[in-house]
Amino acid sequence: KRLNIWANQNKAVILDGSFELDPSRRYSVDLMSCKLVNRIGSISIGLFAFFGPYMVQISALLLAIRHAKEVFLIKPGVNFLTMERISMLPPKSDGIVLVAWGGDGNNQTWKHLKESYRGMKLILNQYEE
């Protein structure tokens, strides 16, 4: 619901996804990065997981003006939001999505971000419970 409210208020956009997951399996995120060809600042990018009607933030990063063209939220052994070694998705997760929010809420900001976005690299490790 909050994501819908943010989107309706022009405070957030979905960059990629939603990608479906098998809720009978457990997942951890081994690596997550996205590529942006232009430098965009004052915007946060985050990976979120869905489980049933709920949504939880797995990792996020505030982009600085001088960010790299490939931005890593999670690398093997470190989640840059939580500083944890393992980035588990909640049990029964059935989807994930990459979201951007913040900035000045200007349509030009979102347009520029979407034009700059060149995809994400996501490596999940899955196992049965």
Image (cartoon, rainbow, N blue to C red):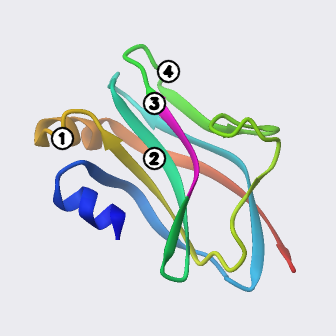
Q: Rounded to the nearest whole Å, what is the CA distance between mark 1 and mark 2? A: 22 Å
First in sequence: mark 2 or mark 3?
Answer: 3
Q: Which residues are magenta?
A: 57-62
**Quadrant where the C terminus lies?**
bottom right
First in sequence: mark 4 or mark 3?
Answer: 3
Element on which disc 1 rests: loop
First in sequence: mark 3 or mark 1?
Answer: 3
- Dot 3 crowding, Cα within 10 Å, few <14, some 14–19, many 20+: some
Q: Quadrant of residue 95?
A: bottom right
Residue at image mark 2? 119
- Picture residue at 37% right of the left edge, 28% below the top: 37
Q: Is residue 64 above or below residue 11?
A: above
Taking the magenta stretch, the answer to whether it contains residue 86 is no
Residue at image mark 4? 68
Mark 2 or 4: the one toward you: 4
Q: Is residue 102 above or below residue 40?
A: below
Residue at image mark 1? 105
First in sequence: mark 1 or mark 4?
Answer: 4
As shown in the figure, which amino acid type bears the numbered disc 3? Leu
First in sequence: mark 2 or mark 4?
Answer: 4
Image coordinates for residue 33, horizontal then vertical, percent: 58, 40
- Dot 2 crowding, Cα within 10 Å, few <14, some 14–19, many 20+: some
As shown in the figure, which amino acid type bears the numbered disc 4? Ala
As shown in the figure, which amino acid type bears the numbered disc 2? Gly
For this view, does 67 lie left or right of residue 13?
right
As shown in the figure, which amino acid type bears the numbered disc 1? Gly
First in sequence: mark 1 or mark 2?
Answer: 1
For this view, does 1 lie left or right of residue 55?
left
- Picture residue at 33% right of the left edge, 26% below the top: 42
Image coordinates for residue 44, horizontal then vertical, percent: 41, 37
Determine which of the numbered discs, if any, sits on residue 62 in the image: 3
